[in-house]
Image: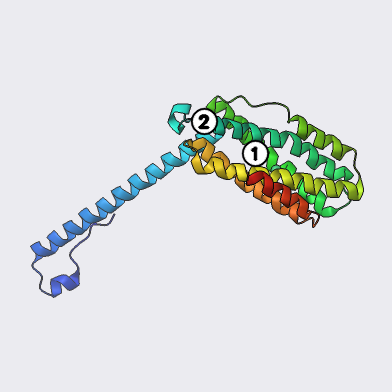
Amino acid sequence: MRPIRPSRRAVERGMPPRLVAGAVAALLALAAAVALISLQTGSSQADEGHHQAAFGADGDGAGQGDVGPVTDVDREFLVKVRQAGLWEIPAGRLAQTHASSEAVKRAGQHLIDGHAKLDQLVREDARILGVTIPNQATEEQQQWVRDLENARGAEFDRLFANVLRASHGKIFATIGEVRAATRNDLIRRHARQANQTVLDHMEVLEDTGLVEPETLEEVEKAVTR
Ligand SMILES: [Fe+2]
């Protein structure tokens, strides 16, 4: 840094040299303090970023005790997210070969992509929180996959849009309940991601134009019990 000398104008204005030197020293001290604060802020942001990256990468950044208690509702939520992926990914794949509607194929692709990411997250969070998650969808979900396997064309499209929209509507309500009450940071993060994914899936399913009013009535009954 170039040494700061009293400005010529200050000298010309007749400020005593000692006063000018004092003002310069004060300015230098202020600049140093600002630089120090800026460095400290940058460093704390970098640490936070590193922590998040490490946590996201291998989950070793925090143990269960650091992120809050896990309730039965939290556990059940992770199980449901895992099971959603276990049947929706096969259903999405079936849409690529059995559907006649391009919108249904597109919805199927969203299911595949969304649950591939969510499944990775749910396996990671379940491991960190010590929650056992299943490797099989429920019997009812497996039956839906079998029904889809046996359908073709317009019949497949209608079945796909309605069965999937109904199940997404129900889990959407569950996510809201979990997110509203959980005391666990990881479950909050998980609910946020699941919420975005489920919302996307409801929208692409609705975009098919095949969701029937009866399907939404069924969801209404289930979520307002
Ligand atoms: Fe989904």
Q: Nearer the viewer, residue 184 or 165?
A: 165
State left or right for residue 43 relative to residue 4: right
Mark 2 or 1: the one toward you: 2
x and y, in percent, of residue 51 in the image: 46, 36
- Residue with the mark numbered 2: 71
| Ligand 1 under 8 Å from disc 1 Cβ | yes
148 or 126, nearer to the observer: 148
Above or below 151: residue 216? below
CA separation, marks 2 and 1? 20 Å
Question: Which residue type carries mark 1?
Answer: Leu
Above or below for 72 versus 108: above
Residue at the outermost front position: 225
The location of residue 202, given as percent across then percent down, is 70, 50
Instruction: Please tell me whether mark 2 sits on a helix, a strand or a loop.
Output: loop
Residue of label 1: 118
Give the secondary structure at mark 1: helix
User: Mark 1, residues whose alpha carbon is within 10 Å: few (<14), some, or many (≥20)?
Assistant: some
**114 sits left or right of 15 in the view:** right
For marks 2 and 1, the one nearer the N-term is: 2
Residue at mark 2: C-beta within 8 A of ligand 1: no
